[in-house]
Amino acid sequence: MQEDGSNHAQSVGFSTDGSDVVEIETWCQSEGRIGTKRDWILKDAATGELIGRATGCISKLLSSLPSLCLL
């Protein structure tokens, strides 16, 4: 299954040779009184080309139990 996944990644333009280096920039910020937001930017370290972006948040629904929600 891992080989199949690797073949699929190559067919859609991602390299799987293991020599690629990815730069990950991340930061978090408060989202009101009950949450925190985290952002990520992924870049090709060799070219600086943007590969992807992501955002996630953690919100506190109950005082004893943190919950994760994806945007």
Image (cartoon, helix red, strand yellow):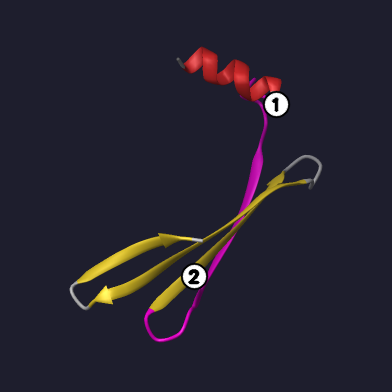
x%, y% of residue 71? 51, 61
In the depicted structure, whether residue 4 falls above or below residue 46 = above
State the mark number for residue 37.
2
Question: What residue do we see at 52% from left, 13% from top?
Answer: 3
Question: What residue do we see at 28% from left, 74% from top?
Answer: 61
Tell me: 58 left or right of 71: left
Disc 2 element? strand
Question: What residue do we see at 36% from left, 61% from top?
Answer: 68
In the depicted structure, whether residue 68 falls above or below residue 3 = below
Question: What residue do we see at 49% from left, 70% from top?
Answer: 37
Taking the magenta stretch, the answer to whether it contains residue 20 is yes
Disc 1 element? loop
Disc 1 packing (10 Å; few <14; some 14–19; many ≥20): few
State the mark number for residue 12.
1
Tell me where residue 1 sits by quadrant.
top left
Q: Are marks 2 and 1 in contact (CB under 8 Å)?
A: no
The residue closer to the viewer here, 71 or 43, is 71
Tell me which segment is drawn in magenta. 15-34
